[in-house]
Amino acid sequence: MPINVAAMIDENDPVFKMAEIPEKSDYRKLHSDYRRRWRKIDPEVMFSIVVYANMRGIFSSRAIEEACKTDIRFMWLLQYEPAPDHTTTARFLEKT
């Protein structure tokens, strides 16, 4: 039975504002720059994770990986997908 992660997050948490950004953004360039058949995570979700991590003062790809595995806000942004490993995050940052 899936856990309702959103119910565990304070309704005023900035993660909810962060989630609104992709709905209002044009990601065509991001999709064209991050075109890989083997990618395991949607570039829009990856972008949200990286921006939210930076908002929280997390800049290291290893620290972002850890946050995705342990912080419910990052889990919510991931939409129940597995956490990207630090290499995936580093490659994403390198390409964007």
Image (tube, rainbow, N blue to C red):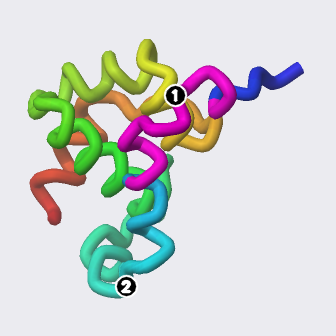
**What's the mark number on residue 10?**
1
Q: Position of residue 8 (x, y in %)?
A: 62, 21
Amino acid type of the residue tagged 1 in the rendering: Asp
Figure quadrant of the N terminus? top right
Q: On the picture, is 63 further left or further right than 21?
A: left
Q: Is residue 23 above or below residue 38?
A: below
Q: Position of residue 37 (x, y in %)?
A: 47, 63
Residue 95 is covered by the magenta coloring: no
Judged from the image, the secondary structure of the residue bearing numbered disc 1 is: loop
Q: Residue at x 64, y 35 (%)?
A: 80
Q: Position of residue 39 (x, y in %)?
A: 44, 54
Q: Position of residue 65 (x, y in %)?
A: 31, 25
- Magenta residues span 6-17
Q: On the picture, is 6 further left or further right than 23?
A: right
**Is disc 2 surrounded by few (<14), some (14 to 19) or many (20+) residues within 10 Å?**
few
* Closer to the camera in the image, 8 or 26: 8
Amino acid type of the residue tagged 2 in the rendering: Asp
- First in sequence: mark 1 vs mark 2: 1
Q: Is residue 92 above or below residue 5?
A: below
Q: On the picture, is 95 further left or further right than 26?
A: left
Q: Is residue 69 above or below residue 94?
A: above
Q: Is residue 83 above or below residue 52?
A: above
Report whether residue 78 is seen.
yes
Which residue position holds label 2? 26
Question: How many dots with numbers?
Answer: 2
Specify the quadrant of the image occupied by residue 25: bottom left
